[in-house]
Image (tube, grey):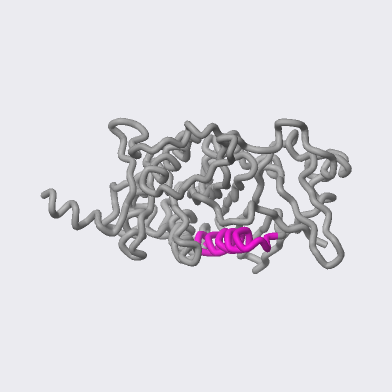
Amino acid sequence: MPYRIKTMGKPPDVIVVVGVGGTGAFVADGLCRLTREFEEIPILLIDPDRVEERNLIRQAFYPSDLGKFKARVVAERLAALYGRRVGFSVTSFTTDIIREFHSHLEGVNESFGQLYPSGKYVGWDLIIGCTDNPGARDDLAHSVQFPSWWIDAGNGDNSGQVFIGNADKIFLAGSFIKGDGDTPGEVIRLPLPTLVEPGLLAAVPEPILDLNCAEAVEQNVQSPVINQFMSALVLEFVRRLIAGKLTWLSAYIDMDIGSLRTIDISPTQVAKLMSIPEKRLWDKPLSGLSYRTIPAQDFVAGTWQLHPGEMVGVANEENEEEEENNA
């Protein structure tokens, strides 16, 4: 029987999308729809790249977007379409960006960011990696900790994969909770995607053919719809995770043969992947290593200005009207 991921009995406090190019922009749009029933979970988009002409085939951009920052373009578009605020950063991913976003949200919403009486932060974040940059993935691997979760999506020309995890190998002790009768078992920690597939940290090889995106599509080297397929798979992971029904450790799609293959979560599977005794996954976790605790002072109210001189902000449906009034 597969095990389902146990969250903290509540939706994530924040959803962060790292990389809003091919797959990420489609994911961000889908998230705005999924989170409506959860009082619009705050969304933060992170991407330092600008829109180039070669992005116009597979990615959700238009000629009028050329030269603009991808994160800002997508955030402003979604804010206008859905009448909601969408955070964005045009810097590379760091944990500090998420901390500052939390601080911003505390400043505009008094109910955001519950604390234990001891002053420790309660809640979890969902980080969705849609980048093929090994450096960014390495930063994610060093940033995501229990009880937050990292969903990583990556693809080639006609295939792709999605992983979910939140813990280094040394934190996996006591991760599984046995079920009772008809009640399925649960898991609170899974190995980081970069542990399940170390190749995610390898440099992306240069294409053999010197083709731009349009030429690659025309010559059947690259599917023009692979990113839509990947975004749908990511969003299904998110939907199931928030609903408390996610039983997948990973999923693989191959458009050439028309297949979707999922790997169920089980202690046997995790033990095999990590080369550790299965018994260890039932043992009590090491003292002091099982929970992410963040001092309350890290979440003080403040303005969202992460790096002076760099464009960071929150897009909302009022931006356009404000710009006209300031002109």
Please tell me which residue is depicted at 45% across the width and 47% down the height of the picture: 210
| Residue 82 lies within the magenta run | no
Please tell me which residue is depicted at 63% across the width and 58% down the height of the picture: 241
Q: Is residue 264 left or right of residue 71?
A: right
Q: In the image, residue 68 lies at what x, y percent?
A: 29, 48
| Residue 232 lies within the magenta run | yes
Please tell me which residue is depicted at 47% across the width and 56% down the height of the picture: 41
Foreground residue among 57 and 246: 246
Foreground residue among 103 and 278: 103
Q: Is residue 325 left or right of residue 274?
A: left
Q: Is residue 259 left or right of residue 268?
A: left
Main secondary structure of the magenta stretch? helix
Please tell me which residue is depicted at 42% across the width and 35% down the height of the picture: 300
Foreground residue among 123 and 130: 123
Q: Is residue 251 left or right of residue 299?
A: right
Residues rendered magenta in the picture: 226-246
- Measured along the vertical axis of the image, is residue 237 above or below residue 14? below
Q: In the image, residue 286 lies at what x, y percent?
A: 77, 32
Q: Image quadrant for the N terminus? A: bottom right
Q: In this figure, what is the number of numbered marks?
A: 0
Residue 220 visible in the snapshot: no
Residue 282 visible in the snapshot: yes
Q: In the image, residue 316 lies at what x, y percent?
A: 31, 55
Q: In the image, residue 7 lies at what x, y percent?
A: 65, 53
- Measured along the vertical axis of the image, is residue 282 above or below residue 30? above
